[in-house]
Amino acid sequence: MNFQIPWNVYQSNYRYKYLALYHALRDAIVGGGLPYGCKLPSSRDLADMYVISRGIVSQVYEMLVAEGYLVSGVGSGTYVSFNLHQSMTAGEPSSPIHLSEWGWRLDQVPLPEVRPTSLSHIRWDFTIGHTDGKAFPISLWNRALYRAVREGSARQREEAFFAQGHLPLREAIAKHLSRTRGIPVVADDVVIVNGSMQAIALLAQLLVNPGEQVVMEDPGYRGIRQAVSAAGGEPVAGRVDDRGMVPEDWEARLLFVTASRQFPTGAVLSLERRQELLNWAVKRNAVIVEDDYDSEFRHKGRPIEPLKLLDTSGRVVYIGTFSKTLFSDIRIGYVVLPPWLRAPFCKAKYLYEPHPTGLTQQHALADFMNSGQYERHLRRMKRIYSKKHALCRQELQQRLGSWFEFVESDAGLHVFGWWKGSGEQYESYRMACREAGIVWSDAGSYIIDTGKKGACFGFAHLAEEEIVVGIRQMAELAVRSE
């Protein structure tokens, strides 16, 4: 019988002979070397051919029969049952398979640029989205997690299909918002989400029809624009200046805004403009989504009152997150909904997530908040971040004020600056800094129409010495690039 497989190659690649034989036969079948209907040697003959035990051959034959590659009959032998031609025909449709309209629109949204797996060459990382992990009370958090795991087994099925999330956590959030943000909210108004982006995406699907205009800040959070585009909405750039979004009489029914601290510039929406936006919403029968992403860390005075506090007609949806106050990987957010939107939102969340994710973390966070540890943690982090913010802003203004126009802001975990030179000069400078091991968050992906260049410099995760040395290195590179 003329039967050949590259046994020596496979034997050297696999520790166990049965795996080597399995993969050698399977690859030969799938690759067409052993065509459909081909009769294989008996287990005895194949064992003699490659000097292996008959038991190994029988085991491999049984594996391939079970997976449908071979068929075996008593007294008739073993044959290849995998038809390569049919498999290729089934895998390559003659005409393209079309996505739904929503799927097609989503496919047009580019995935974010993934940072390199290895950052060993980066010496000073000023990118945003980080917290100070060294200052986080990990031992207290671990105790809360341990209690949640220990006590959770008896009640885990009680909340398995409850879309709103863990009730004690919603109660704790309601108390926290009432006490620290002044928002009159009860637990029934709150829904726990898997990060604020989940809330934004669900709201876009619930409130946007294809072709409808949706207003968002320019510059603004890229995730909002992507969610609206995927839902078929037409993003409308709302101009931003040093007092936040500039109100206009847009022909739209939905608006996204970061009122307490505009993303990414850090500007605070003035009281006059807040009232104008609310009046516009009433006039247009529109909804305003307020994303309050990191205003807890105000470095002068108490946090700015949210737009939601002025809402008397149930038109403002308020989104918050713990990714900035605790640590970025926790992925627990919340949304405060007006009564008319609660049921549709919960049904949409249930569709994607019938069993809420992170219930153990939700239980731990409720414990962490109700014990008072969360507010103690916030007070400590405000002191740490305020000191870093002042240092970072001072160094940036002093060292790089000739190249960037830094936006005045007294809150948050990053400093924003508009580039004063040309786009080509900015890209050249950014690449020179990257080659020297210095990176920041480029604001290009946040901008819709302005065409300007800007940068976000995160400082929360850096030591004070790293902030100083990194910015001074940037200044030296800026001088050389002139």
Image (cartoon, rainbow, N blue to C red):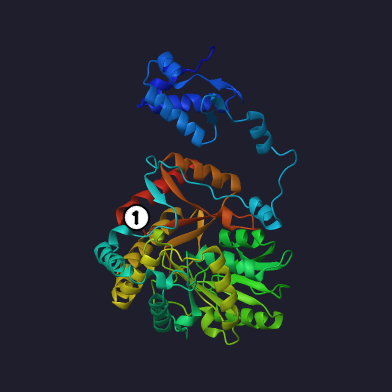
Q: Is residue 406 visible?
A: yes
Q: Amino acid at mark 1?
A: Leu
Q: Residue furthest front?
A: 75
Location of residue 116 by image quarter: top left
Q: Nearer the viewer, residue 267 or 399?
A: 267
> What residue lies at 71% left-to-right and 46% top-to-bottom?
97
The quarter of the picture where residue 282 lies is: bottom right
Across and down, in percent, residue 414 comes to 44, 61
Measured as percent of width and height from the top left, residue 291 is found at 52, 70
Q: Classify 416 as above or below 442.
A: below
Q: Which residue is mark 1?
A: 462
- Assign a secondary structure to mark 1: loop
Query: Looking at the image, which is closer to me, 408 or 340?
Result: 340
**For mark 1, does the 10 Å Cα neighbourhood hold few (<14), some (14 to 19), or many (20 or more) residues?**
many
Can you give x and y, in whole percent of width and height, for residue 415 in the image? 45, 61
- Residue shown at the point (37%, 40%) measured from the top left: 120
Q: Is residue 427 left or right of residue 100?
A: left
Q: Residue furthest top?
A: 2
Whether residue 296 is visible to the viewer of this picture, yes or no, is no
